[in-house]
Amino acid sequence: MNIKGIVAIYKYEMSRTFRTFGQSIASPVLSTALYFIVFGSAIGSRIGEIDGVNYSSFIVPGLIMLTVLTQSLSNASFGIFFPKFSGTIYEVLSAPISPFEITTGYVTAATTKSVIVGSIILITSTFFVDLNIKYPFEMFCLLILICLTFSLFGFIIGVWANDFQRIQLIPSFVITPLTFLGGSFYSISMLPEIWQKISYFNPIVYLISAFRWSFYGEEEIDLYISITTIFIFLFACLLTIHFIFKTGYRIKS
Amino acid sequence: MTAILVKNLNKYYDNGFKALSNINLEIKKGEIFALLGPNGAGKSTLINIICGINKKKDGEITVFGHDIEKNYKMARSKIGLVPQEIATDSFEKVIDTLKFSRGLFNKKSSTEYLEKVLKSLELFKKRNQQIRTLSGGMKRRVMIAKAMSHEPNILFLDEPTAGVDVELRQSLWKNLYDLKKNGVTIFLTTHYIEEAERLADRVGIIHQGEILMVEKKDKILEKLGDKRVIITINKTSKNLKNILIKYNYQKKKNKLIFSLDLKNNRNSVSDLFKDLINNSISFYDVEIKKNNLEEIFLKLIDQ
């Protein structure tokens, strides 16, 4: 096992984050703080409670998801896309490091960044709302699991992308809309029945439901179904990455 | 001992273009091997396949006996690669990029060794500078330092001196000699014939994906290197015509350019001088030119 190789990639990716600290960490924190001010304090104070939880507190898990999902995707996709774009990928491909080790280096770095961002948002939220997290350990495990899964997905996007536009394509046109429509700011039960049914096809609904459960102990969808959905997605990403390295898809000509 | 062995290697791209055709090549440990070829001949493709960047269609490649696919970790651990394009993270510091390269090859961190590499490439003073602040030549040295950072046994250099000024080129050549002295096998591609002529122990010539010749540099020059004797005469004499009948020559003003076949007659130069002196033909300048690799190379790819 090339542990030093994994550590080298991990350290390189983390140093890139801290080099671009504003873009990587401060920017999502600022935008989330704005969400809290607008949706939490200004509008939320007029909405009241949802499922027995104050609206400002209710949106915290959804807001964290909204940020960490896009962060995981963009961090991991950029991590592998940039070496492809700049040509520095040659070094990784010619090193004695296995596909599993390469993926581990990039994806764990992207996961770490997203978990840091998620944790900072959580801390930021305490300045705006009173938070009592019912299952903090489970919350943290779910955060890591979701960040890991979406970092794997981001890695796939980074390999698939041929240009900068494609890097933004899925986060902007798929993930962000699905997160907004996945119950970040409302409960699925508030929707008309037909939209509730349609929402169940949105995988983000399951993530937000499980994550919100860890905060308030109430789930909209059975917890086991939600966790199974996350694991199915995780294994689908792993299989796709295995295929990428086996065939050299968009990495080796 | 064999450092690299390539057997029956073929490479097709998805569009059907045949980049390499039945390549067979053996590189010996400790030698400097230069692969010559025009642009698009397949030089970089061959290097990239050996190093694991491109896929091969079929054939077998081993590096110090390790198959590059079945035992790729062992094979790649022996190799350092300097690609044709300068590709680095511009915002990284020189020393950090070397540490990254060393780590990728699962080598224990060694500031002492990396500083030694930096000193040998005259980069030590620049070690804490961001790569973007360096000149093109210095960046090229950083690429070599990265390839050296994990103490490779074989160094691949894909056109290492392309676009590099004369001073830096000569200094890089010196670096390569030093590496060879330390037992590093060097495989370089170039289209600067002078580079191959100066550095290489053996030379391969590749054209349109096929290796046309692999030979010791001296042997190629000997085999195909006719000599030309250029004589500047004082004035045309009657006897001159009698002599000229025997030789293959060209006349340009008062210069006579003789092409002498040294392969079949090793005394041809002395025979020519004897003839000139015996026939009282006076000359005031003599220049002897060996065909260089460039002419041999052009001759071969024209065939």
Image (spheres, coloured by chain):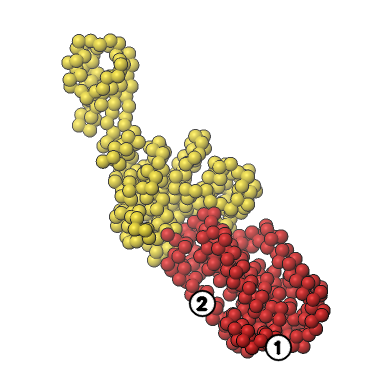
Quadrant of the image occupied by residue A23 = bottom right
- The mark found on residue B121 in the picture is none
Q: Are marks 1 and 2 in contact (CB under 8 Å)?
A: no
- Give the colour of chain B: yellow
For the residue pair B275 and B83, the one nearer the viewer reads as B83
Q: Are marks 1 and 2 on the same chain?
A: yes
> Within 10 angstroms of label 2, few (less than 14), some, or many (20 or more) residues?
some
Secondary structure found at label 1: loop
Residue holding disc 2? A236
Which of the 4 quarters of the picture holds residue B282?
A: top left
Task: Say what amino acid the circle numbered 2 marks.
Answer: Ala
- The tag on residue A218 is 1
Dot 2 falls on a residue whose secondary structure is helix
The answer to whether residue A49 is seen in the rendering is yes
Return the chain for callout 2: A
Q: Is residue B301 above or below residue B15?
A: above
Q: In the shown orientation, is residue B154 left or right of residue B213?
A: right
